Each structure stands twice: as structure tokens, then as C-alpha cells.
Image (cartoon, rainbow, N blue to C red):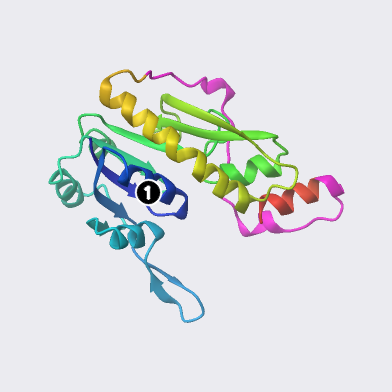
Amino acid sequence: MKIVYLGSGEFGIECLNALNSSDHSVELVVTQPPNPAGRGRKPKPTPAARWADTNSIPFIETDNANTPEMIAKIADYKPDLIVVIAFGQKVGNDLINLPPRSAVNVHASLLPKYRGAAPINWAIINGETETGISIITLAQKMDAGCILGQSKTDIAPDETAGSLHDKLAQVAAPLLLETIDRIADGSAVYNQQDHSKATLAPKLKKTDGYIDFNESAASLEKKIRGLW
């Protein structure tokens, strides 16, 4: 299938590598504009933009993928499916409904638990012993789409957010390929989430990193690992 990839962060690079080595074709990468970074505050392209440049894949940097102009540009590539991973923008219905196979998202939790921007961090902070990857359809309510596939992994006692991020990125790649293959051959099963069991993983704030030494040592240890 022809795929348009919407993503910005490092988390999706393993999936991009897997897609690029598969029978499917990454036709276009859409990503956030460069952000100032480092001591000199020079604009730095996103990991997804750098990947596309390295692999000679066309890419577009935009702060709004939902404009009519952007949707028209994406439509020119005639995608069969849109894949969204760590994009940093809400994707509207016009874009979701553009390709015949719609759009899927890779999320770093076992949904419906930990919907939101920071599922890896909050799973560790809250003392979970396992987490995983969910492949879902895109919906207008955050992370509430149908589940097409899930894969579990343990959270080690000394796990940090950084190490779990890298572990889950590795888990995501084969699961995404399996899911896309099932979408392509018509065998994918679309399971509704149990919305009554949903929990949230909101975007981290600076104040989440404050240490209160009135908390227990065990609580602080999980918090430090979850924010590392």
C-alpha cells in the first residue's frame, strides 16, 4: 500500500525503517516545522524530517496539516493509508477520510489506559509493571479509536522513561507492519475500546518535575525514573 506518514518525534523512526523495508511504500512524510534547539537556538528539523531527507523520501514541514492546501498536497500522492506517530498535531476528519483505508495511529500504552501525550512517563510514575503498544484508528476524541492490534511488554524495576521509550519503539515496528498487512488483505479486526476504563496521561508540565520530600521514597523513585 501507498502510505503517507504524519509524524515528528524519534519514537516513530523504527516504524519508518520497517515500512521502508517492507512491501509497502512511504510516499510522503508530513512533519512539524524545525524548532530552535541547542545553545545557539538554531532551527533543527524533526527526526522524521531528517529520516526522510536521509532516505530520499519527499517531506513537507507544516504547523497545520489540516488546511485545504495541505490536504490537496497530500491527496496528490494518492495514499491508501495514513500512519500517524508522535505527530504533535490533531488530525481532522477531512484528512482522516482522505485515503480509502483511512488512518491509523501508534500509541505507547495498552489502551484504553493512558490516553494522552505522555503515556510512557505516567505508566512508570504510577508504578505499572507492564505496558505496550496499541495500533488504533484515528478518532476526533483523543486516543479513542478502534483497536486493531496490541503488544505487551514488561516495565523493569529500574526502567526509565528513556529506556522504555526505546523499548516500545522496537515493539511498535513489527506490530505496525502486521496491522497494515491485515488492513491490506481485509482481515483486520476493529475492536471498540471500553471507554469506561479509560485513564489519562496528560502532557507533562514543569511542575510535574518538582520533588516533594514529604512523599515516600518509593513514590519519589518512580517519579524520578518516569521523568528521566
* Residue under the point 24% across and 55% down: 57
Q: Residue 197 lies in magenta, yes or no?
A: yes
Q: Is residue 131 left or right of residue 35?
A: right
**Foreground: 1 or 59?**
1
Task: Return the x and y of residue 125 as percentages of the image width and height.
Answer: 70, 44
Locate the N terminus by quadrant.
top left
Task: Return the x and y of residue 161 as percentages of the image width and height.
Answer: 63, 50
Q: Quadrant of residue 50?
A: bottom left
**Foreground: 108 or 64?**
108
Dominant secondary-structure state across the stretch colored magenta: loop
Q: Quadrant of residue 120?
A: top right
Q: Residue 50 lies in magenta, yes or no?
A: no
Task: Return the x and y of residue 164 as percentages of the image width and height.
Answer: 61, 46
| Visible residue check, residue 138 | no
Q: Is residue 198 left or right of residue 9?
A: right
Residue type for callout 1: Asn
Density class for disc 1 (Cα within 10 Å; few <14, some 14-19, many ≥20) is some
**Foreground: 73 or 163?**
163
Give the vertical position of 45 relative to 204 (above or below).
below
Q: Residue furthest bottom?
A: 40
Q: What span is colored magenta in the figure? A: 189-218
* Residue under the point 39% across and 49% down: 87
Please give the residue where the numbered disc 1 appears in the rendered image. 17
Locate the C terminus by quadrant.
bottom right
Q: Quadrant of residue 97?
A: top left
